[in-house]
Image (cartoon, grey):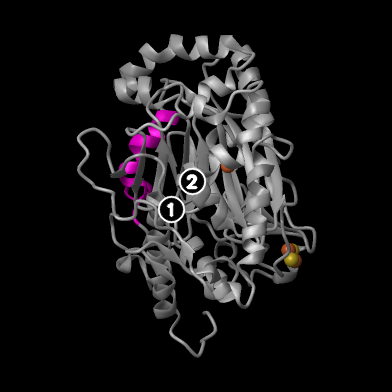
Amino acid sequence: MLKSRSFDEVEELKKMIDLKDGRIDRRIFWEDWIYQLELEKLFAKSWLFVAHESQVAKPGDFLTTYMGQDNVIVSRHKDGKVHVFTNSCTHRGNRICFADRGKTRQFNCNYHGWAFGTDGALMGMHEESHYEGSIDKSKWGLQNARVEIYKGLVFACFDSDAPGLEDFLGDYRWYLDIVLDQTEEGTEFIGGCIKNMYNANWKFGAENFIGDSLHVGWTHDSGTKAMTAGGAVPEYMPVDPNSFHANANGHGWEGGIDGIGTLGIMSKGHPELIEYFQSQRDDMAKRLGDLRARKIFGSVISATVFPNFSFLPGISTMRTWLPKGPRQFELRAWTVVNKNMPDNIRDIIQNACMTSFSPSGLFEMDDGENWENATLSNEGVITRKQGLHYGLRVGTSRRDDPELPGNISRPMYSDVNQLAFYQRWLDFLAADSWDDIPKQR
Ligand code: FES
Ligand code: FE
């Protein structure tokens, strides 16, 4: 239970998020009590991305990650099922796995030798005879989360009352499929995980990727010129009245419909990359239709699955913003490709992904510096009293577009998706249970 405070937290939070005028209180980026609410009422209740199936392809494969600040093991059991369970021994709480990833038949605790299966069950312990049959091992396994897989992406949830993953994703599946469902074979992660620590609040990563088109031409101006031998951002991301923000259930997608912007940046110096994607469009269109295969995919796009999983279609990075306190997060990022891509195309994508978005990438640190400075300065005792402006094109989204599912606003330069993210954030933090959270937003 959270410690009680001398004010009504939910009422205070509601005052902090003004969805009508687009104003947000700076305290959401550093107050410790808000962060504790996020851990308990958001991260412990929501579906969270934990792995791509390809990372735990065979029985015994495992990796470790975080759900909120709970360290968890994602592991494929011998029956073929993926399990997600807490990485903390039920004897004295020691961590039972210290590796980032690997292959094992069981997890043995260093302290007194309790052993757990790849499904989290307690299997036995060192000198078990001392217990003289007094311990029911079936009651002392690790805490398993619910696990569901959407087209290769493994999500887990610790709340037994949460709706299924497909309902949680809702209309947003239509957008996710643009990356995940281009081919019959599906996708996989290649090249390992890139980790990166930021002294910033995790929400800056999520809200930037969900809809912050505006920063690209300014923050990433020099990076884009370096990446493309002099090309400016508008050459790849023209101001197009038909570009859009789409959001559903707090998940968001922003992007153009020229079908070429991101691929243009990625294929600079590698014309075979753009030739490859153009040669795939007909097959893609059979699965996704013309709009998604020819106009949306390939444009400059960024996206966030609520709350903390983001991706850039075309640039091929997928990433989580793992909270480590209100003023720090860990970014974990991977390169995603289609399983049926030839080796030379995978290599170009991986190199271009690392050149743009990695600890030494041309774009990654542009963003990180801004988010760290914003987190730090929002805390000033005078500074904190003034709200932040999130009012660009506020109130312009509609759920009646003939082609695009979800709530749509045009063009892509707006704060609409960011506000949808904070609306969902407030839904979770104000709720006592899933019964209080609207099924659809
Ligand atoms: Fe794990 Fe004692 S803490 S066996
Ligand atoms: Fe950026």
For disc 2, the marked residue is 212
Residue 364 x %, y %: 65, 40
Left or right, residue 301 beside residue 296: right
Residue 195 x %, y %: 70, 44
Residue 204 x %, y %: 56, 54
Of residues 154 and 288, which is closer to you in this image? Answer: 288
Left or right, residue 325 beside residue 309: right
Disc sitting over residue 418 in the figure = 1
In the image, residue 178 lies in the stretch drawn in magenta: yes
**Quadrant in which the C terminus is drawn:** bottom left
Name the main secondary structure of what is drawn in magenta.
Answer: helix
Q: Quadrant of residue 192?
A: top right
In the image, residue 397 lies in the stretch drawn in magenta: no
- Residue at horizontal 50%, vertical 29%? 234
Of residues 324 and 260, which is closer to you in this image? Answer: 260
Instruction: Rate crowding at label 2 as few (under 14), some (14 to 19) or many (20 or more) other CA atoms within 10 Å.
Output: many
**Mark 2 Cβ inside 8 Å of ligand 2:** yes
- Residue at horizontal 50%, vertical 90%? 6
Query: Which contiguous range is marked in magenta?
Result: 163-180
Identify which amino acid the numbered label 1 is placed on.
Gln
Earlier sequence position, callout 2 versus callout 1:
2
